[in-house]
Amino acid sequence: MTANRLVAALATLAVLLGVLAPARAGVDRPPQFVVMAFDNCTELERWRELTDFAAELNKDGDRIHFTFFVSGINFIADSRRSIYEGPHQRRGYSRISFGGSTEQVRKRIDYVNELYRSGPALYGALKANGFRYDTSGAAHADAWPEKIDGIWRFNLAMLRIQGLGRGALSMDYNFFMAQSRALDDPRRYEAARQQTLQTYLHYFKANYAGNRAPLHIGHHFMNYQGGAYNEALKSFARAVCGLPEVRCVTYARLADFLDRQNAETLAAYRKGDFARAATPVLNVAENRR
């Protein structure tokens, strides 16, 4: 073989190897972030329940943190409701709950302060009286957050309910509506719990072994379907929080992580340009009432 033919053959081999060999990962694999947040945070028993649940999971390490969205009127006692006048509403009226008795407001403040001292970074999420992130949108389950006009968009995921086939956002009330048209029915409790749990586990597995887009799950301080969704969330959290490379964090901590990445790294995350992980085997300890 002549020198020219040898060079040409080696060049062809190099091209073939480049096609057959996997592309080199552009960046290190990011953690799998899981963010679980709660709206309408009024009921004191739910504050206690979730505070105790987080303490239980964190007793052997830093496994889980929640985000709580609390309206200012949740800190106004019913007897003082006349001091509130919302936009285009009559004074003393609100579409969501006032704070109850003065003692209930005080206890709610105590819960917020207790969680803040243990790390959910409530006030750290506020910056110069502005917001760092918005959670009101929706996106595909494998979509990485985007920063638009200086605000991170942390969107609920569009999911397909396992065992039902209907679409729903990753929020308890959306499941409640899709599964039963938001009608409480004891006959549906177990099916609702199982379908929700399996949907969250499928969401987690797909992203964990895929492009690692953060999971966004939103719940309320309500016991829809006899608490089926709350129990599904607890079983899910027990199964995934604490696994290798998994970070169950507040939105504030997720925003901190994203702010530390440069544009090239974030672009690589969105493309999944990193070594993929195997689908994890999950030990799901059922949480029964």
Image: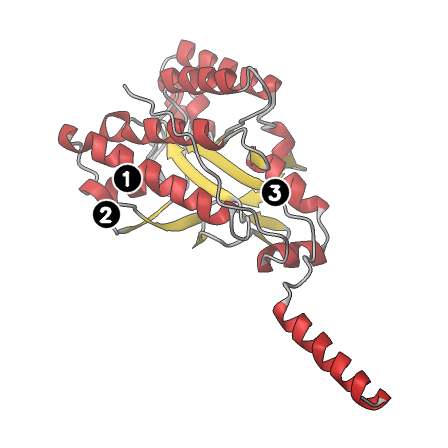
Counting from the top left corner in percent of width and height, residue 171 is at 37, 40
Residue under pointer 1? 195
Q: Residue at x 64, y 51 (%)?
A: 150
- The amino acid beneath tag 1 is Gln
Which circle, 3 or 2, is nearer the viewer? 2
Q: Residue furthest top?
A: 103
Q: Residue at x 27, y 19 (%)?
A: 289
* Front residue of 82 and 133: 133
Residue 12 image-quadrant placement = bottom right
- The amino acid beneath tag 2 is Leu
Q: Residue at x 59, y 20 (%)?
A: 61
Residue under pointer 3? 132
- The amino acid beneath tag 3 is Arg
Residue 131 image-quadrant placement = top right
State the separation of the CA atoms marked 3 and 2.
36 Å
First in residue order: circle 1 vs circle 2: 2
**Callout 3 environment at 10 Å: few (<14), some (14 to 19), or many (20+)?**
some
Residue under pointer 2? 164
Q: Residue at x 80, y 88 (%)?
A: 1
